[in-house]
Amino acid sequence: MNLPATFHDLSGTSVFITGGGSGIGASLTEGFLRQGARVAFVQRSESGAFCDEMERATGTRPLFIPCDITDVAALKAAVDRAAEAQGPITVLVNNAANDERHRTLDVDEDFWDRSTGINLKAYFFAAQAVIPGMQAAGGGSIINFSSISYMMGNAGYPAYVAANSGINGLTRALAREFGPDRIRVNALAPGWVLTQKQRDLWVTPEGLAAHIDRQCLKDSLAPEDIVGGALFLASDLSRMMTGQALVIDGGVVVTG
Ligand SMILES: NC(=O)c1ccc[n+]([C@@H]2O[C@H](COP(=O)([O-])OP(=O)(O)OC[C@H]3O[C@@H](n4cnc5c(N)ncnc54)[C@H](O)[C@@H]3O)[C@@H](O)[C@H]2O)c1
Ligand SMILES: O=C(O)C(=O)C[C@H](O)[C@H](O)CO
């Protein structure tokens, strides 16, 4: 990954990323490591090979903690372990999500609870787990990954879309509550980012062409394209920015 900028204040920072071993999360892990940050990440699947790769590429090994983020006690234990090993967490990236497709008339209560458990509830409890450490450290930055899916009004995964809208409400509420502690809380909403998983599961030539037709910029987005926005929101460069949603989508959703 070639990063054209250095955010000096991120060097040595203790960063915690959910789902930091694959997809966009893997690029976030690499991006923060390249800034000299100490990165801990959680996900369910084994990540030894990815950590080896990161150590080779950046000179620093991320701390991988296996954890299902829908298990709130395990999530809190993972945050505590990361803080103990790498110092108080001052950057939290709520990135892990599940965009499994479903149809409204097929959804039962169990599916709804599982979906919102990953896509919304875990965001809240990860924030709750890091906030006392951020308060003690004199501040921090929480970055909540959302999605343009709810701005576009996408069909095909209503529980996911609802959670992504909810993430913006949560972001604003936490920004208001913890602003006096100098804890900034922002959302980052990517457009369609062509991870390997997206290519394997959801990308069709027609679907992609129709989507790019809606973008102002006609290139497709790669995971690396999202990293700069996350580094900016983590860094003091965005010192007075909180409660906002930063959209990186090639211009599908025209904001302003
Ligand atoms: N890829 C896109 O096109 C796109 C578009 C808009 C928004 N986003 C958002 O960006 C973020 C990352 O997306 P992505 O496409 O890289 O996702 P992904 O599905 O490729 O990766 C998600 C990560 O979360 C982890 N994860 C999932 N469930 C978990 C659980 N219960 N416990 C622990 N870890 C778990 C996975 O292991 C994986 O590492 C998400 O918040 C997503 O909503 C992605
Ligand atoms: O899945 C998401 O969160 C997306 O935003 C993906 C795309 O924007 C979508 O699949 C294109 O219609």
Image: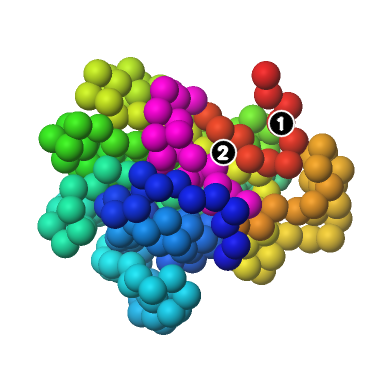
- Vertical side of 219 occupied by 65: above or below: below
Residue holding disc 2: 189
Q: Is residue 229 visible?
A: yes
Give the distance between the C-alpha atoms of the residues marked 1 and 2, in whole angstroms: 10 Å
Which residue is depicted at the point 29% across and 36% down?
140
- The amino acid type, in three-letter code, at marker 1 is Val
Compared across the picture, whether 221 is left or right of 60 comes to right
The amino acid type, in three-letter code, at marker 2 is Ala
Q: Quadrant of residue 243?
A: top left
Q: Which residues are magenta?
A: 225-244
* Magenta segment includes 242: yes
Mark 2 neighbour density, 10 Å: few (under 14) some (14–19) many (20 or more): many
Left or right placement of residue 21 versus residue 179 in this view: right
Q: Residue at x 71, y 31 (%)?
A: 253
Of residues 75 and 143, which is closer to you in this image?
A: 143
- Name the disc covering residue 8, or none: none
Tell me where residue 165 appears, x and y as whole percent: 51, 30
Tag 1–tag 2 contact (CB < 8 Å): yes
Q: Percent from the top left, x then y, of residue 150?
A: 60, 33
Q: Which mark is residue 253?
A: 1
Note whether 179 is above or below 158 in the view shown. Answer: above
Disc 2: residue Cβ within 8 A of ligand 1's nearest atom: yes
